[in-house]
Amino acid sequence: NSISYEVKDFNSTQPVERWEFKAGDDRSLDSLFSIIDNVYIEELVIKDPYCAEHEELLLQLLEIIHKKSSEVEKLIIHVKELSKHHDNHRPVYIIKSSLERQVAQVFPKPRIIVHDFYQGRSFHDRTIEMKLVDKDGIESSQCYDLTAGVDYLLDKNKATKVYRYALDD
């Protein structure tokens, strides 16, 4: 004999949570980032090779995280230089200084790491990693895998999926 269960019966026990955002739908990120409500973020690491091309959307994401969390101690952002043949190419030092200036509006001392085009060829994945400390001092690490990056996550006219799971410490 077997017992049938509905998908909703497994949601609280799954190690991976998934959100699907459809193009044109309202894009509330409250449930996506509910885990950081009033939580101290020891370290926030954003890895998105192309988010330097959409600084305004990156800033929106940082504002959301800043408002939801109690504090973010350290911010590290990894981006990649575009090919020199790309119309929007900017040198590494310009990308770095521009992002530092923009991000400092929300977080005073960001660490910006720009991977040059040739060394960053294997840099494709887009993630948000957080080391969290709750009010009881319990630490955890969470990872958000973004299927299409920060720009698609913040642009309600684009479809994307996000997966969140705990990282092993």
Image (spheres, grey):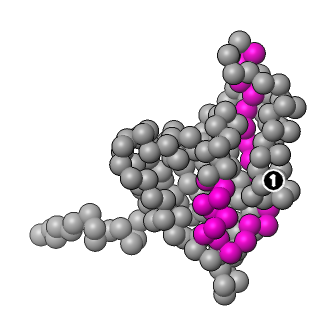
Of residue 50 and residue 100, the one placed in the foreground of this image is 100
- Magenta stretch holds residue 68: yes
Rendering coords of residue 29 (x, y %): 49, 59
Q: According to the image, label 1 marks what residue?
A: 104
Furthest toward the top, the residue is 85
Of residue 63 and residue 45, the one placed in the foreground of this image is 63
Write the start and end of the magenta stretch as one range. 61-84
Q: Residue at horizontal 71%, vertical 59%?
A: 44
Query: In the image, 90: left or right of 128?
Result: right
Rendering coords of residue 94 (x, y %): 84, 31
Query: In the image, 80: left or right of 96?
Result: left
Q: Is residue 52 above or below residue 136?
A: above
| Quarter-of-image position of residue 40 | bottom right
- Magenta stretch holds residue 108: no
One can see residue 169 in this view: no
Rendering coords of residue 169 (x, y %): 68, 65
One can see residue 35 in this view: yes
Which residue type carries mark 1?
Ala
Q: Residue at horizontal 60%, vertical 60%?
A: 64
Q: Is residue 164 above or below residue 40?
A: above
Query: In the image, 37: left or right of 100?
Result: left
Count of marks, rendered view: 1
Rendering coords of residue 16 (x, y %): 46, 60
Q: Residue at horizontal 48%, vertical 53%?
A: 163
Furthest toward the bottom, the residue is 136
